[in-house]
Image (cartoon, rainbow, N blue to C red):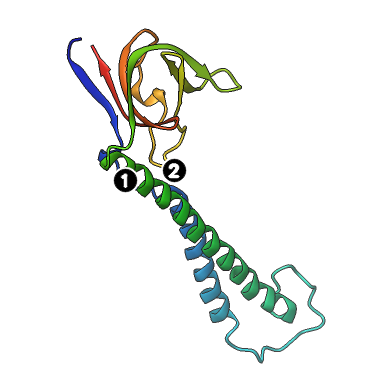
Amino acid sequence: MGESEVLYDISRGVYQWMMPGFGLIFVVVSILSIIVGKFIYKDDHRILDPSRERLFFNPYHPVNKNAIINIPKFILVFALIFTVVSFFFTYKSYLKFNKVYREEKYSVLQGTIDRFIYAEDGEEITAFVVNGKEYIYTNDEIDNLFVGIGSYEGKIKPGDTIQIYYSGKNILRLKIFE
């Protein structure tokens, strides 16, 4: 074997906050909506004009006042639940795989890539087979595991000799030999 290059190492990664961060966007927007709604409707003694048409956001209609304040509250509760739950599961996964790697409770396999396994659409590679064993990777960075081969364009090809540090079917470290 010649020189080797580490293409992926879970210990070098940082927690991928994208999914909980997405929920935080809705938390912020709903809080701002609640504040703006309360500011607009701070005067509860507006003159109701029955001759006005009932428009969707007619500020003089009492039903809309409650809707404009209560809908963002509902979105806030849902966004908080989504953010906390997604953070819990993604961070738990991140800690679990980093602990496995630090404590060296993984398996190591060295061999040649037999073939790639493609997604149902036939365009995206979702796994590869080394010495008859399938290794998957994520197509996003939510759980901090090895991310698609596309990001290592041209570096991984069938027939290449690689060394895989893995837990289950999840790749914790990937080294390619030249």
Looking at the image, is mark 1 or mark 2 nearer the viewer? 1
96 lies above or below 71: above
Instruction: Provide the secondary structure element on which disc 2 rests.
Output: loop
Identity of the residue drawn at 40% across and 10% down: 158
Q: Amino acid at mark 1?
A: Lys
Residue 175: x and y in percent read 27, 22
Looking at the image, the residue that sits furthest to the right is: 51
Along the line of sight, which residue is nearer the eye, 45 or 96? Answer: 96
Along the line of sight, which residue is nearer the eye, 31 or 134? Answer: 134
Is there CB contact under 8 Å for labels 1 and 2?
no
Identity of the residue drawn at 38% across and 32% down: 146
Residue 71: x and y in percent read 64, 69
136 lies above or below 98: above
Instruction: Provide the secondary structure element on which disc 1 rests.
Output: helix
**Residue picked out by circle 1:** 99
Identity of the residue drawn at 39% across and 37% down: 145
Quadrant for the N terminus in the image: top left
What whole-number distance in Å separates the C-alpha atoms at marks 1 and 2?
17 Å
**Residue picked out by circle 2:** 142
Residue 60: x and y in percent read 70, 80
Looking at the image, the residue that sits furthest to the left is: 3
Quadrant for the C terminus in the image: top left
Residue 147: x and y in percent read 40, 31
44 lies above or below 29: below
> Is residue 78 toward the left or the right of residue 106 in the image?
right
Q: Amino acid at mark 2?
A: Ile
Along the line of sight, which residue is nearer the eye, 54 or 41? Answer: 41
